[in-house]
Image (tube, rainbow, N blue to C red):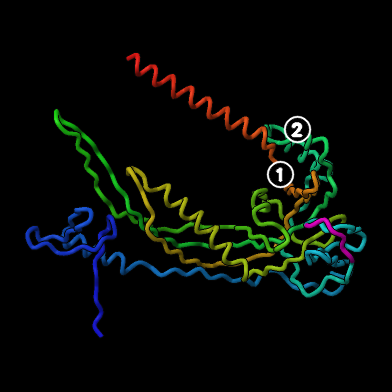
Amino acid sequence: MAELQGFKCPCCDGAIEFDSKTQKMVCPYCGSEFEMDALQAYDEELNNQPQENMTWDTSAGGEWQEGEAEGLRIYTCSTCGGEIVADETTGASACPFCGNPVIMTGQFAGALKPDLVIPFKVDKKAAAAALQNHYKGKPLLPKVFKDQNHIQEVKGVYVPVWLFDTDADAYVRYKATRTRSWSDSEYRYTETSHFAVVRAGGIGFENVPVDGSTKMDDTLMESIEPFDISEAVDFQTAFLSGYLADKYDVDADASIGRANERIKVSTAEAFASTVQGYTSVVPVSSTINLQNGRARYALYPVWILTTQWNGQKFTFGVNGQTGKIAGDLPMDKGAFWKWLLGVAGAVTAAAFALSYLFWML
């Protein structure tokens, strides 16, 4: 069966047709006209657009050597099912993720050995101080929260993270416009020129992190980034002494989707920054091909603090390397409405002043 081919307007995506009078392709929707040679070149550009390929080598981590994991234990939370790795001397009385009791179930086995670990630099006292400092400068925070809210648990946890390295070749197409206006004694004119903009090139990525634990909230984990990977060292079990280590339950292959998403966003931002000099720029399509993609397995240091107020539990994460903190706080609804009414009143007063000024003129 013969295939039918249609042509779309590069400006508005409407179907275009040949106009015998002008000998050009014309869009009946936006009125744009295209020379045949230019349209043919544009069509060839679309047909030659590279196919996307984002595959990875996910052979991360290593095998435990004989006797290397003998001093490690697994604590399993009976509520959320989290498996937390610690050394044999660590007391694990509560799950750092949900706050419920955990019990020791056995040796650490059946998992890869981490390639790297970033050691803790922020101690427990500094993590608690970071939470108190987090309360400052929050006008909508209930005043009694600081007094009645008490830290129930502070746990140092090594969170499993997959680190993705790759070289990316990207091809991005944009629709761009450039507008100029002028006027005469009777009319004001606006001319809009449309452009098809292409950007292609290479960009390298190193250590793109993806949380490998379903118990650790991804948003919370990414909110306390960045971690300085230059301070990472080869993994040794001694780094677990006095801390817990969450056992990964999302493997490297299952983490590829999030890694690709982060790479696509960063690539789009980098390439878009090079498209300048236009009134508007809209991305149309992009393809990314990865080369030499690989994943490594690392442990990141995180302090997890749990507090309770008015029967509600609040969880905070503190970057164990930098002290950066993130977490949700309650809101004083009364203070919120006062603030909103104050803003509305200020806007109304400003609008009234401007209207009075124009009336006076």
Q: Is residue 116 visible?
A: no
User: Where, by quadrant of the figure, is residue 147 drawn?
Assistant: top right
> Which residue occupies the extreme bottom position in the image?
1
Element class at badge 2: loop
Residue drawn at (78%, 45%) of the image: 122
| Image disc number at residue 143 | 2
Dot 2 or dot 1, earlier in sequence: 2
Instruction: Name the mark nearer the viewer: 2 or 1.
Output: 2
Q: Which residues are magenta?
A: 98-103
Q: Position of residue 91 (x, y in %)?
A: 91, 58
Report the Cα–Cα distance between label 2 and label 1.
20 Å
Position of residue 215 in the picture relative to residue 100 (left or right):
left
Answer above or below: position of 179 versus 10: above
Is 314 in front, or is 55? 314
**How many neighbours does mark 1 have within 10 angstroms: few (below 14), some (14-19), or many (20 or more)?**
many
Residue type for callout 1: Ile
| Label 1 element class | strand
- From the viewer's perspective, is residue 10 above or below residue 128? below
Q: Is residue 100 magenta?
A: yes
Q: Which mark is residue 325?
A: 1
Seen in the picture, residue 44 relative to 175 is either above or below; the reply is below
| Residue type at tag 2 | Lys
Residue 150 percent coordinates (x, y): 84, 42
